[in-house]
Amino acid sequence: MYLLGLDIGSSSVKAALLDGESGSVIAAAYSPKEEMPIASPHPGWAEQDPETWWHHLKIAVKDVVFQSGARPSDILSIGIAYQMHGLVIIDKAGRPLRPAIIWCDGRAVVAGGKAFREIGEERCLQSLLNAPGNFTAAKLKWVLDHEPRLADKIHKALLPGDYIAMKLTGQPLTTISGLSEGVFWDFPQHEPAGFLLKGLGIPEGLLPEAVPAFGHQGQLTAAAASELGLSARTTVSYRAGDQPNNAFSLNVMSPGELAANAGTSGVVYGLSDELKYDPLSRVNTFAHVNHTKASPRVGILLCINGTGIQQAWLRRMLGGGLSYAEMNHLAEAVAPGSEGLAVLPFGNGAERMLGNCDLGASFSGLRFNRHTRGHLARAVQEGIAFAFQYGLEIMQGLGLEAEVVRAGKANMFLSPVFREALSNTTGARVELYNSDGAIGAARGAGVGAGFYHSFEEAFSGLRLLELTEPAPKLTAQYAQAYRHWKQQLENAIQIKQQ
C-alpha cells in the first residue's frame, strides 16, 4: 500500500510516493523545473495564482505514479504540506476571488500593528501567543479594507494547504495548527479567537471548520481523481504548514527537540509543552501538529531571512563556475574564525529576530593581504551559523535548550563547515536524516489514515545519515569567533538605531 505526500511551496510543488510497509520512497518528483513566478504588483507585495499550484501538483503527481508504476487503487491516502501564512479567499463555488497573498508579502504589516495596539498587546500575546503582525489574519483584514468589492463575495478564507485539500476533496476545511499559524487561534480558550475577529471586523463565518491534522479530511472527488489519474477511493488524511511538517518529518514531536532547515532562508523550530511567547515577537509560537488542549504541544519558530541566499550570492560573485562543493572545500582549508573576518548575513530584508531591523549584509575585518576566497566562503557559513545561535539565545529565554538539532540532508546542511560551525557554536548534536517535506507529508497521511498505529511505526523508515558533535578543541575557537561576531552585530544595530 502506498502513501502520497505533497509539498506546496512558493518555488515548486513536490510529490513523494512512499511504500507504507517498508517506509521507503519509491518515487519523487517536482514541478516546475524552474521556480514558479511570484507577482509583485507593488513594492513589498507577493502573490501567486492558486491554480498554478494545482497545475504543477497534477504534473508532479502524474510523474511519481508513472515512475513507480503504482496502481492508483493502491494509493491509500494523501498528506499535504504547504507554504505557511498565505491567504486564499474563495467564493461559494470554491473559486479564488483574487491571487493568493503569500508568506513573503508585507502589505499587512500596518494593519497587524494597528490591531495589536487597539485590541491590546497583552491580550493578543496571552491568547494568540503572537502579535497579529503580517500573518493571515492581518492579510484578510487588508483585503476587507482595501478591496471592499470582494467582501460580500468571500465564502471562506483559506491557507494554501486548505485550498489544495479543497481542490482534492471539495471541502473547505482547516486545522487547529493552521488557524494558529494564521493567528486566528485562542490558546487558553482552545477555540477560534472571536475577540480578534471582532477587533479586525472579520465575520466568524469566513473561517473554515477545523479538523484534526491527522485523520479523515475527505475523499477525492471524481473530478479530482480524474485530473490526477488517481482513485476516487483515496483519502486526504493529513495537512500541516511547511515548518511544523518539517519538524514532524524529522520525528520532532516532544518538548526539547528541535528541527532546522537552511534553504533560501533558515528556520529553527523547537517544541514546548508550555504556552509561552516572546514579548518582543522576535520568535513566534504556533500549535504543533499533535497539539491538544489536554496535552499542549507548541512550536516556537525562529526565522532568519538571509541564509542560503547569501551562499548563492557569494557563489555568483566569486564566478568561474564554482560549485557549492568547491566552495565548501575552500572553506575547509581556513581555520575557524576566518582570521577575524566576520559576516552579518542579513541582506534579505528586515529580520524579525532583530526587531524587524533591516541591517543589510556586511563584511567586517577584511584584510586585502590576508583574506582569500576560502576566507570569504568560511566567513559566510560561520556568519549564518552564528545567526542561528543568536536566535537560539532568544529561544532559550522561552525555556528551549538546543541539545539536538535535526535536519534533512539538503541545502546548507550539505556543508561540513556549516555543520561544524553550528554544532560547536550551539553545543548541539546536528543530526541529518533521509527526509523532506513531501516524505513527511506521506508519513503523516499514513498516521491519519490509520495505516500506522503510532508515530514510532510511521518513522520506522527514517534513517540517520550524518552526525556532527561538538569537539572540545573547536568549541573554544568558535566561542571566541561568535563573541567577535556578536559584537559586530550589536555595533551595527546601534548605528542603525541612531
Image (cartoon, grey):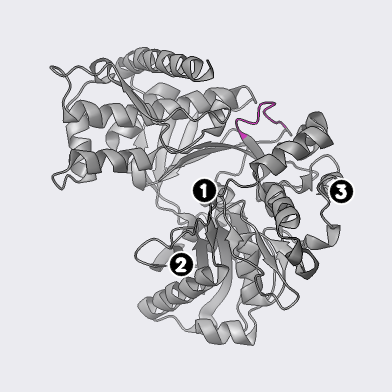
Looking at the picture, tell me which residue is in the foreground, 354 or 432.
354
Q: Residue at x 81, y 54 (%)?
A: 202
Residue 221 visible somewhere in the drawing = yes
Q: Is residue 293 left or right of residue 460?
A: right
Mark 1 Cα shell of 10 Å, populated few (<14), some (14-19), many (≥20): few
Q: Which residue is mark 3?
A: 198
Decide: is 464 above or below 239: above
- Residue 135 is situated, as x and y percent measured from the top left of the image, at 66, 46
- Earlier along the polypeptide chain: callout 2 or callout 3? 2
Mark 2 Cα shell of 10 Å, populated few (<14), some (14-19), many (≥20): many
Q: Are marks 1 and 2 in contact (CB under 8 Å)?
A: no
Q: Residue at x 28, y 35 (%)?
A: 416
Question: Which secondary structure type mostly characterizes the magenta part of the structure?
Answer: loop
Residue 449 visible somewhere in the drawing = no
Q: Which residue is mark 1?
A: 43
Q: Start and end of the magenta stretch?
A: 276-283
Decide: is 410 above or below 89: above
Disc 2 to disc 3, C-alpha distance: 39 Å
Q: Is residue 104 left or right of residue 14?
A: right
Q: Which residue is mark 2?
A: 15
